[in-house]
Amino acid sequence: MLNKEDLIALWLHRWFAFSNRWKRLIDVDGWRDHTVAEAMKLEDGLQGQSPNELREKTRRMHRHMESRFRNEDLQPYLEDNFRQLAEVVSLPMESVPVLRLMIFLQAEPVITEALNLLHSRMTQQIASLIARATDRDEMKVLHWIGHKGTFERSGLFYSHAKVRGMPPQFFWDEACLNLIEEPTPPGKIFRDIATQRSGTELTFRDYEHLGDSLGDLRRYLRKALQQRKTGVNIALYGPPGTGKTELSRVLARDLKAQLFEVATSDPDGDPVPVEERFHRIRFAARMLSGRNFLLVDEAEDIFPEGSAFLPNTGPTVGHKAWLHEVLASNPIPVLWIANTTEGIDSAAARRFDMALSLPVPPERQRRKILRKICRNRVSQSFVAEIAKHPKVAPAVIAKCSQVAAEAARVDEAKRAYEERIVRLVNQTLAIQGHGEIPWGEETEEPKSALPPLYDPAFVHCPFDLEKLAGRIRRRRVARLCLYGPPGTGKTSYIQWIAETAGLPVHLHKASDLLDKYLGKTEQRIAAAFKEAQAEDAILLFDEVDSFLRNRQTAVRSWEVTQVNELLKQMEEFDGIFAAATNLWEDLDEAALRRFDAKLFFGYLLPDQAVKLLGKYCLFHGLESPAEDELAKVAKCGALTPGDYATVLRNAALFPLKGPSDFVERLLAETKHKKDAVTKAPLGFHAA
C-alpha cells in the first residue's frame, strides 16, 4: 500500500522524467540535491559513478514506482481526506489529485526544493508539472490553481496579493500537516476553527431598547434563511459588554438556526494571526449551509488598514479585495461583532446589509437584566443602585456575579455577596479607566451621589434654585451652564434635581471625553448625548471649559471642531443638559448664548455659612458653636458647601474635638484658595 513518501517519490520522478530533465538532478559529482534524491528513494551517489549510471538508476526507480502505483492502492486516508475536502467545498472530483499535490507542496519542503531545481516557481510552470504528475489536462490544472481560480474561490486557498504569478496557498498550515499525516475529515478541521455556540437565558425583551431596528433585523434574517440568500452581512457594534454576542444567540434561537463562532485562538491557545483568521472565516462560511449563522467576534481586527473598523490595524491593504469578496459572496449570514466602527470607509460599509448599534442598555433595561442575572441572591435596592451606573455593562455584572457566587462562603449573608460583587465590578471599572461605584460602609444601602446634608438653601445663587428645579422637572428640557468657584455645589445641584425627579445622571468629566486622536473627542461627545437621550437621563459635563473654549483664540482646528460638535449636540438634544465650570472667562461667547440659563454659584453668604455650621455640628454630635465661632465663619467670605463636606470626611481620620475645631478646619480650607471674595456675575444670566 502506497504511503505519503511513495507519493512524493512518484511525483518527483515524473517531473524529472518529463522532457528528460535529469541534468537538473545529476551532475558530474553526483546528485545536485541529496535531499531531493533521498525523497526519490535513490541511493547517495557513490564516488566513481558516472552521470549515465546515476541516470539509469533513476530510470529504474521511476519504472518501479510507476508499477507500484498501477498495482497498489494508496493508504485510505490519503484518498479520503482530500476527496471529502473537495466534496464539502464543491470542487470537481477530477481535481482531487491536484488538490492533494497542492497541499503536499505546502507541507513538504522537499517538493519546493525539487521545483527550485527545475526552475519552476510561477503558477503556469507549476501547473504544467502538476498536470504531468497527476495525469490531468494542463489547462484544467491552470484553471483550478490559477489566480481567482476554482481552488481559490472554494475558500481553501488564497493568492498573495503582492506576489503575482505564484500559486495559491492553503489557508491553514497546520491543517496541511494533518491532512497528509493522518485521517483528517473536514469536520475535524472545522471544529478546530469554529465552535458551535449554545443558547442564552436572554430574550428579545432584554433588547427592547433597540426599538424597531431589532424587528427589522429579525424579519430580514428570517427571509435570508428561507431564500438561502448569499452575501448577507450584519454588523453588531457597541461598547464591550453590551450584549452583542448574546443577541446573536437570541437571534439564532428565534430563527431555529445554529450559530458557529470562528475561533480567535488555535487549539494550543495561541492567538490566530489576523491573515489566517480571515481565511478561516472564508473556509467556515463555505463549510456551512442551511440554517446556520457564522459569528465573527473582534471583527475590527480583520478589516484592512485604512478601510477598517479601526485605522492602522489589521491586514495589509492587499486584503481589501479578499474582504469585499467574502462580504459579497458568503453563502450563509455572517454576524460581525465589533466594539467600534471608527475608521470604516464607504466601500466596506456599503457591503453590510444592516449595522445595528448596541449601546449600554438604559437604566430600566439594566434593572431587568440584573434581576435575571442575579436572581434572588441580591436585594432590590442593590439592583436599583447598580443599574444607575451606565458604565456597568450587563456582561460585567454577569461575570462578577458568577465569580462572587463561586467565591462565596457557606451560609453567607446577602449583604456580603453584594459587597463582593461591588468589589469585583470596581476592579473591572478600574481596568477600563472608569470611576468606582460608591458604596456605603456603614449602611445597608449604597451611598447617594449627593454630599451629606445637601440642601439648595445652602447654595449661594442669585436665583431660587428650588423653583428653578421645579420648572426643569416639569419641562424635562433645559440647557444650563453652572459656573463659579470649586465646591460651591454646581454638580450637586444637578444631582439633586435628578434624585428628586427620579432621573438618572450621566456625569462626564473632561478626562472621560478628551482624547489624543483627531476626531475622537467629538465622537465621544456625540456618544454621550446619544446615551443620555436613550436613557432619558440628565447629561452633565463637568470641567466643560476643557472643550468649550473661545473659538476666537483657537490655534488648532480641533479646538474649533470640539466646540462645534458640542453646540450641534446641544441643539439636537431633547432633554436636560448641564455644563459646569470653574473658568467662566474661558468659555466661548457664542456657545454661552445657547444656554437657557447661566447660573452663578458663589461662596456662601454669612447667614448661610453660619446656619450650615450649626447643621453639621448637630449631624456630627457636637455642641452648638459659640458666638465668637459663628462670627469667624460669618466673616470668612470664602466658604463653600464643599468645605464642610471635606471637614466631615477628614473627621473620619482625625476626630473633631469640638465646634471650635470644626471652625478652625473650615478656615484652614480657605487658605488654599486663590481668591477670598465673591465674584459677582456679569450680564444676563437666566432666560
Image (cartoon, rainbow, N blue to C red):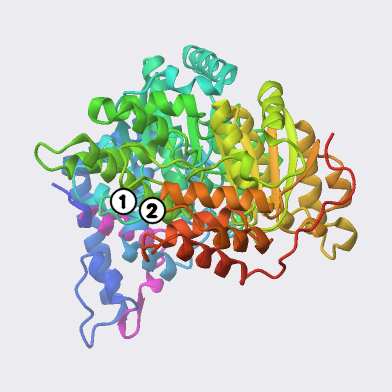
Q: Left or right: where does residue 291 sit relative to residue 186?
A: right
- Residue most extreme to the left: 410
Residue 451's spot in the image, x, y percent? Answer: 50, 46
Residue 601's spot in the image, x, y percent? Answer: 71, 49
Q: Which mark is residue 69?
A: none
Q: Left or right: where does residue 407 sit relative to residue 261?
A: left
Asked if residue 355 is positioned above or below residue 521 in the image, the reply reads above
Callout 1 touching callout 2 (CB < 8 Å): yes
Residue 443's spot in the image, x, y percent? Answer: 32, 41
Q: Which mark is residue 272?
A: 2
Q: Amino acid at mark 1?
A: Asp
Q: Residues within 10 Å of mark 1 (few under 14, many from 20)?
A: some
Which SS class for mark 2? Answer: loop
The number of numbered discs placed on residues in the rendered structure image is 2
- CA gap between label 1 and label 2 equals 6 Å
Q: Residue at x 78, y 56 (%)?
A: 584
Q: Left or right: where does residue 7 sit relative to residue 541?
A: left
- Quarter holding the C terminus is top right
**Residue that numbered label 1 is attached to:** 266
Q: Is residue 128 or residue 369 the one in the foreground?
A: 369
Name the quadrant containing residue 686.
Answer: top right
Q: Residue at x 51, y 35 (%)?
A: 360
Q: Amino acid at mark 2?
A: Val
Q: Is residue 282 magenta?
A: no
